[in-house]
Image: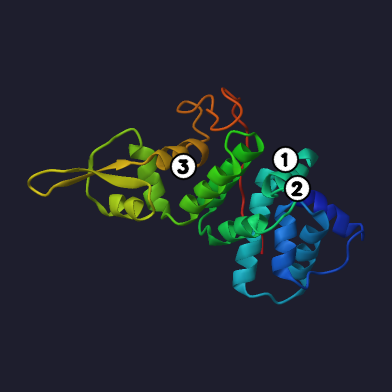
Amino acid sequence: MKYTEQIKGLISRGEIKEASTNMLEDSINAVLGNRVSVAKIMIAIEKSPFFLREQLFWSKVEAFLNGVYLSEEDCAKLGAKLTENGEIKDNPLRLVESIDRAETQQKIRYLINVTRCLLADFIDRPTYFRLCHAITHTLEEDLLFLKEHIKEKDLPYSTYTQGLLTVGLMYQSILDGNGEQKYSFTPVARLVDQFAVSYDDVERYPNPQSTSVQDNAPQIKIPSLEWGNF
């Protein structure tokens, strides 16, 4: 059963009745796995005349939660990963902002992929937020170009290379005497492909290589992603 479906059960049984009065605070607590906050947002969305932006935002958060929280253990684990010396600080807010900025369903999938990789210790927290930033600040079309050409180097200039250059996923690798520029992918771009964009491609990455703890870790199966219903 999906994470949010379980919480809908709590609401239907009357265990949680209060609607959210602070969407930001409850959203931060929701990504940390707080079921009460998730339920309060659900009740507020259902009962209040929220603007389209709030509805779109919650649909993304709901999809993210259903993709990340596959077990009870995941909630506590992500909370621990996002704290610094026992203090929450701004990390949950950074994650909420990344979810809000993701303008496509596929980008939510990428955020789910990197979050599951964080939980599995394939990447550390700084790398996690670096990849989240790259995902949300890059056009979907440019990410697909990255996926298709990541194994190539010295590519000619195009609107795709310009976009990837702007966000730091490509660099100018050749400038010949005729002024013809060539571009290659940065190491971060390869991490974006491995842990986010092509993570579900088991033929390309059958055993994700850890940047921190575990090597040759098994592929994590993530359920299909659906936007929430308004």
Q: Residues within 10 Å of mark 3 (few under 14, many from 20)?
A: many
- Of residues 224 and 209, the one nearer the viewer is 209
The answer to whether the residue labelled 3 contacts the one labelled 2, judged by CB atoms less than 8 Å apart, is no
Which residue matches tag 2? 3
Q: Residues within 10 Å of mark 2 (few under 14, many from 20)?
A: many
User: Which quarter of the figure is the N terminus placed in?
Assistant: top right
The answer to whether the residue labelled 1 contacts the one labelled 2, judged by CB atoms less than 8 Å apart, is yes
Task: Tell me: residue 61, above or below residue 24.
Answer: above
Disc on the earlier residue, 1 or 2: 2
Amino acid of disc 2? Tyr
Amino acid of disc 1? Leu
Which disc, if any, is residue 192?
3
Q: Provide residue 221's location: percent of width, then percent of height.
A: 63, 33
Which residue matches tag 1? 70
- Of residues 118 and 42, the one nearer the viewer is 118
The nearer-to-camera label among 3 and 2 is 3
Amino acid of disc 3? Val
| Quarter of image, res 10 | bottom right
The answer to whether the residue labelled 3 contacts the one labelled 1, judged by CB atoms less than 8 Å apart, is no
Task: Tell me: residue 223, above or below residue 57.
Answer: above
Q: CA distance from mark 3 to mark 1?
A: 23 Å
Identify the element where label 1 is drawn: loop
Outermost residue, top direction? 216
Judge left or right: residue 21 versus residue 154. Answer: right
